[in-house]
């Protein structure tokens, strides 16, 4: 089964206009769908597959409200890659960090640091509480979502229930 998500996780309650879901406590996930954008290949920033200048600008702006992480996953059947970074007060505090699972001799992109569980490291940097028996990723319910489309669908359901 695939797990392909990307977006910004805030360490504070996000009440802006971008689609978002509550993960746990005041942590929110703001998903971004870039793969089918008009200038996808021209606008992504390496070593990321999905991060654009516009998303990075949003990340930087949000980080003035509190710590934020940008994450990407691309898994299928347990094999895949994850990459992350964290920001606070308009500055990058960690990353880009990259991890590979089930990939022999992975090619680490220029500018990225190879670590175990890169998303967990970014979540630690934004002060995510780790529940007993779970890592930071599972404590934030990130495994509940398989794609950004699922996240946006949940957002739409919450909006319609408020109406």
Image: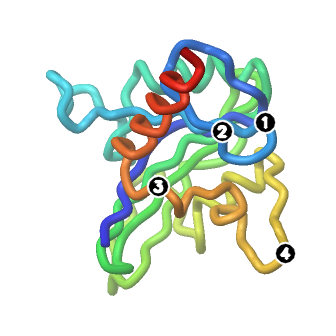
Q: Which residue is mark 4?
A: 132
Q: Which residue is mark 3?
A: 145
Mark positioned earlier in the residue sequence (3 or 4): 4
Q: Are marks 1 and 3 in contact (CB under 8 Å)?
A: no
Q: Are marks 3 and 4 in contact (CB under 8 Å)?
A: no
For label 4, the crowd category at 10 Å Cα-Cα, with few meaning under 14, some 14 to 19 and many 20 or more, is few
Q: Which residue is mark 2?
A: 22
> In the shown orientation, is residue 101 left or right of residue 38?
right
Q: Quadrant of residue 163?
A: top right
Residue at the (79%, 52%) spot, across then down = 128
Mark positioned earlier in the residue sequence (2 or 4): 2
Q: Mark 3 falls on what kind of element?
A: loop
For label 3, the crowd category at 10 Å Cα-Cα, with few meaning under 14, some 14 to 19 and many 20 or more, is some
* Residue 93 image offset from top left, x and y in percent: 72, 40
Alpha carbon separation for disc pair 1 and 3: 18 Å
Q: Which residue is mark 1?
A: 26
Q: Are marks 2 and 1 in contact (CB under 8 Å)?
A: yes
């Amino acid at each position: 089964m695939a797990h392909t998500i990307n977006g910004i996780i805030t360490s504070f309650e996000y009440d802006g206009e971008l689609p978002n879901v509550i993960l746990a406590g005041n942590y929110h996930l703001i998903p971004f769908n870039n793969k089918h954008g008009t200038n996808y290949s021209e606008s992504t920033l390496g070593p990321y597959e999905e991060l654009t200048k516009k998303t990075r600008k949003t990340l930087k702006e949000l980080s003035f409200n509190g710590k934020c992480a940008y994450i990407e996953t691309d898994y299928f059947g347990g094999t895949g890659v994850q990459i992350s970074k964290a920001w606070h007060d308009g500055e990058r505090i960690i990353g880009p960090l990259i991890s590979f699972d089930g990939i022999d001799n992975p090619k680490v992109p220029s500018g990225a640091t190879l670590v175990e569980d890169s998303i967990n490291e970014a979540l630690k940097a934004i002060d995510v509480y780790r529940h007993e028996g779970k890592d930071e990723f599972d404590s934030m319910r990130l495994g509940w979502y398989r794609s950004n489309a699922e996240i946006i669908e949940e957002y739409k359901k919450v909006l319609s229930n408020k109406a």
